[in-house]
Every structure is written in structure tokens, then in C-alpha cells.
Amino acid sequence: MATNKLLLTFAICRLIVTVGLTVDPTELLRLGVDGQLSVDPADVETASSDFGLMTRAKPLAVLHPASAEDVARLIRAAYGSAPGLTVSARGHGHSINGQAQATNGVVIKMSSSRERTAADQTSAAAAAARPQVSEREMYVDVWGGDLWIDVLKATLEHGLAPKSWTDYLYLTVGGTLSNAGISGQTFNHGPQIANVQELDVVTVGKGELLTCSEEKNSELFHAVLGGLGQFGIITRARIALEPAPQRVRWIRVLYSNFSSFTKDQEFLISLHGLPASQRFDYVEGFVIVDEGLINNWRSSFFSPRNPVKLSSINADGGVLYCLEITKNYDESTAETIDQEVEGLLKKLDFIPTSVFTTDLPYVDFLDRVHKAELKLRSKGLWDVPHPWFNLFVPKSRISDFDEGVFKSILGNKTSGPILIYPMNKDKWDQRSSAVTPDEDVFYLVALLRSALDTADETQSLEYLMHQNRQILRFCAAAGIKAKQYLPHYTTQQEWVDHFGDKWAQFHKRKMEFDPRHILATGQRIFTPSFAHNTKNTKPINTHNSIIASS
Ligand code: FAD
């Protein structure tokens, strides 16, 4: 019986490779996979959109893979298809600008969340494969579509946890590794892409599953990390672990003076590499330009037990800065935690009356943004357009950015949290595809704003997107060499400028690993070699998308 099924599948695959896969969905459904190739309107609808809710692109079908081999089957068929077929992996669809979409192509639904849909249940072999932890060698092997929250839960059963995080854990391993994966631990451990030991990747050219690492197929390994989905589909990642802390002391302090704030942040990240007792484990921060926002969805911390009134603090130009730091501890260090925190705080120059402290289990700290998500969902404020905009700003120009953006362009109104924290460039492996500014220290500035359909035009999508463009123009005019994180561009020249010295290598890697440019076309970096049927990505509202040609 199994042999018959195998033979049938083989025969279908051969047929497809011989005659070429057509872009007719019924033909597509003949591809033999163990999971499910779906044209169910609900699946297609989900894959047509993303968290940004600004760009729509309808795929022909959605693959729910049962295994890495299913991914390889699809890629082989798509690569061999005469009329051409694009393929995009979709993690949890938390991109902003359609990066995981595939117009008239196939979207591979990689996410194997434990909150699976009915379709997932039928193709759940991959989803059911639990992360495999090696306690002895301190790593975990995970499916590329696993959510970080599930990775955390699985590793905690062994008293272990990954070292480097994102602020929000309902993102997939493959999705964040295709960008970088950053948070307050990055200054010390590097981004998530610096904490990967090995990957399994389905490449396009050969349609085969390759294991890659520093030692093996290293060009592919470095290409894929931060590679924006351009070089292959990550089906497995081996992530480095550390003993999991039990608890977290979480502290926020306020500054009215920007240079004191950044001086302290830079001092704190310079302590990387020191014994844990002599540094914080996490350093972030955010900007408060609007009193309403002190209790926004990312800072519920302040209320209701810690209400803060901006008017009670003498803010410089109406702007306050909040430093957010944590220290991990467990039973063995519980006795010294107060002393260690006190010793570090003494070296900082914040407003003395503005110390807000809380203490919570490690997992609750890591999963903090999910609580905010649930709150926003309950108010109908989660599924709204998100014109989020992330920049890496070189340290030497961060005060110019403060003057020009926080104190000027934003005009006392933000419509969402604005994060700001520095990172050490030497924690980033320059062989990866990720792009950072050309300075030893650079800041993430993240404008995480939601557009609302209200009478207040400053909350509209058009207004917020206009501000994003204004910020880019301001940086260009002021010569601030900022780089976009989670980049989005509409012309190839902008991509060439973004990659700078790395463009030649990025292009060469593309030609080697995806010569027909069929992968992750939603990033709009390269035009597929059969561009005729991929150009109808539909922008919603004013957002214009032009596919760049190579
Ligand atoms: P998707 O958006 O589905 O995919 C992103 C890109 O990766 C696409 O091009 C896709 O084709 C490709 N891709 C996905 N899976 C694979 C795979 N297995 N193999 C190859 N390519 C693949 N980022 C941070 O760094 N730090 C943060 O703190 C952070 N916080 C966030 C909080 C929220 C609420 C949200 C919505 C996003 C946040 N992000 C953060 C951004 C996040 O890293 C990106 O959205 C990223 O794209 C991961 O999301 P995803 O897993 O849904 O991937």
C-alpha cells in the first residue's frame, strides 16, 4: 500500500517535472505531498495578508507541509515549472509589507503553532515534531516554523533556554532568522542569527535539503541568516542554549535629558562580556512624547500600581526617555540581586524619583508582549494597519535623530510605542546577509504605530506613512546613514543602497541559490525570470509596490 502510494507520488512528480507545472490550481493540486496543498479560500485569504494589513497578494495555493521533504518537492516542481511559479515561506505572517506573500504562487505555511488550524491538523507531522533538546551539548533542534514561545516551553522542561530573543515570542524561528531577531539581550549575545549552530535548508537550484553550518556549506549558512528568505527555506535550526534563569528583576527609570539617557545606555552595553553579576542582562528603552502613551500597550508596567504623570516630571521639550533594564537571577543569586542592581543603578544619571521596579518569573518577562496583544485584541485594536518602521541609527548621529525626529517630526504625538536601544556591532557576524550601519555601536529605533480610523487624522495610515517617509528624507538630507531593519523598498536602486558593500555578495548568492528568483518575491528585491504573472501585488491604500528587476 505504502509502496503503491510512493510510486504514484513519484509518477506524479515525474509528470510535473517532465511537462512542467502549470499555474492552474487544479494542476498544482496534483503535486504529491504528504501534507496538504490547499486552495481553501480561508487558507488563501490568510496567506494573502499579514500583520501590517497594508499589502495584499493572493497566492494560488497554500502548502501545509508534513515534512522538509514536502517543502523540497514543491520547490523542485516550482523550479522546473515552465511557466514559472513563485514560492514564499510564511512564518507567522508578522511581516509589515507583504514580505511573506507570493502573488499567484504558493505560500508554504511553516508555522506549526500549537494553536493549529484544522488544515494544520491534517498535515501535522512537522508540527507534531517537538523541539529536540540536547542537554549535554546545550542546543535545541527546532522546525523552521516553530514559534519561539513553543521553543521556550520545550527547552524550559530541561532547565534551559535560548540566549537571544525578540520582544514578542509568537514569531517563527525561520521568520526571525531571515531578518536577525533582536531585543534587549542583543548587546550581550548578539542577534538570534548569531546564536545558530546549524540549519537545514531547502535550496532552489537543486531542490534538495542541505545541512549547513560554519563548517559545512558555510556560504549557504551565512547567506540564509538575515537573508530575507531569498536563498532557501529553513526547515530546521539548531539554537544554542544556556541554563534558564528563574526570575527577573525588571527596572524602568526615566530621563529628561537625551544625552544622559544615551550615555547610560551606551555605558550599560559596554559591560557585555563581564560576569553576569557586573552587568544587566537586557538593555532597552523607549521614548515618551505624549502623556497618553506613558501607559501605552508596551508600558502597562507603569500602571495601575505605578501611575506616572508626565506633568510631574520636567520633560525636555515635552519628551521623556525611559531606560528599561533587567537582571536575571535564581535561588543561588537571590541574596545578592538587590546589591548588584543597586551597584549598577548608582552609576546611572536618571531622574532620582523615577525608579519603577517589578519582579517576575523569567517566562513571564519573555512573554510580556503577548499580554499586551490579548488586551489590544479584546479592544479590537490588534487587527488594524501597522505602518511599523524600524531603523538602525549610527551612534554618532543619534542625538541629531532625537532633535530632528522625536522633538520635531513627531510633533508630540506618536500613535504607538517608540523603542530605542543600542547594540554592539562586533556581536554581529559580518558574513551573514544582515545589514547594519558602519559604526561599532548603533541604535534600533522602532516606531511601532497603529493606524486607526478615527476623526483624528494624526492616527490615519496616510499620516503615519507620510511621517515615515519624512523621517527617511530627514536622514538623507542630514547625512545620517541609517539602515532599515525589516527593510522595505520599492526600487532595486534602494536595495542596492541598502546593502551597500554587501550587494555584490547578496546578488551572487541569489544567482547561486535561487537563479530563477522564485523565492520570497514579496520582499521585492529581485524579479522572477518569468515576471509576467507576478506583478499584480495589490497595495492597499496609498502604498505603492514596484517589483525591482535584477
Ligand atoms: P513572516 O513575516 O511570515 O516572514 C518573514 C520573512 O521571512 C518572509 O520573507 C518569509 O518568506 C521569510 N521566511 C519565513 N519563514 C521562513 C523560513 N522557514 N525559511 C526561509 N524564509 C522564511 N523582530 C525583532 O527582531 N525583534 C522584536 O522584538 C520583534 N518584535 C515584534 C513584535 C510584534 C508584535 C511583531 C508583529 C513583529 C515583531 N518583530 C520583531 C518582527 C519580526 O521579527 C518579523 O515580523 C519577522 O518577519 C518574523 O515574523 P514571522 O515569523 O511571522 O515571519
Image: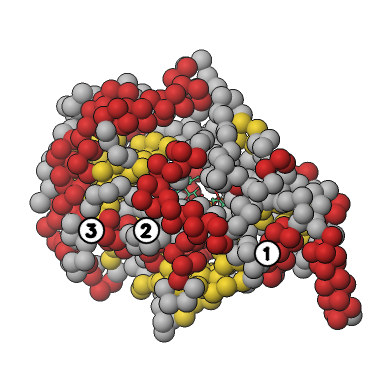
Amino acid tagged 1: Val
**Crowd rating for badge 1 (residues with CA inside 10 Å; few <14, some 14–19, many 20+):** many
Identified at 41% across, 82% down, the residue is: 137
Taking depth in this image into account, of 237 and 232 the one nearest to the observer is: 232
Q: Are marks 2 and 1 in contact (CB under 8 Å)?
A: no
Relative image position of residue 116 (x, y in whole percent): 67, 57
Marking on residue 429? none
463 lies left or right of 6: left
Q: Is mark 1 within 8 Å of ligand 1?
A: no
SS for tag 2?
loop
- Among the two numbered marks 3 and 2 on one chain, the one whose residue lies closer to the N terminus: 2
Identified at 41% across, 29% down, the residue is: 468
According to the image, label 1 marks what residue?
A: 71
494 lies left or right of 150: left
Amino acid tagged 3: Phe
- Among the two numbered marks 3 and 1 on one chain, the one whose residue lies closer to the N terminus: 1
According to the image, label 3 marks what residue?
A: 280
Quadrant of the image containing the N terminus? bottom right
According to the image, label 2 marks what residue?
A: 191
Quadrant of the image containing the C terminus? top right
Relative image position of residue 103 (x, y in whole percent): 68, 43
Taking depth in this image into account, of 209 and 54 the one nearest to the observer is: 209
SS for tag 1?
helix
Identified at 47% across, 61% down, the residue is: 223
Q: Are marks 3 and 1 in contact (CB under 8 Å)?
A: no
Q: Is residue 413 above or below residue 210?
A: above
Q: CA distance from mark 3 to mark 2?
A: 17 Å
272 lies left or right of 450: left
Q: Is mark 2 within 8 Å of ligand 1?
A: yes
Taking depth in this image into account, of 507 and 463 the one nearest to the observer is: 507
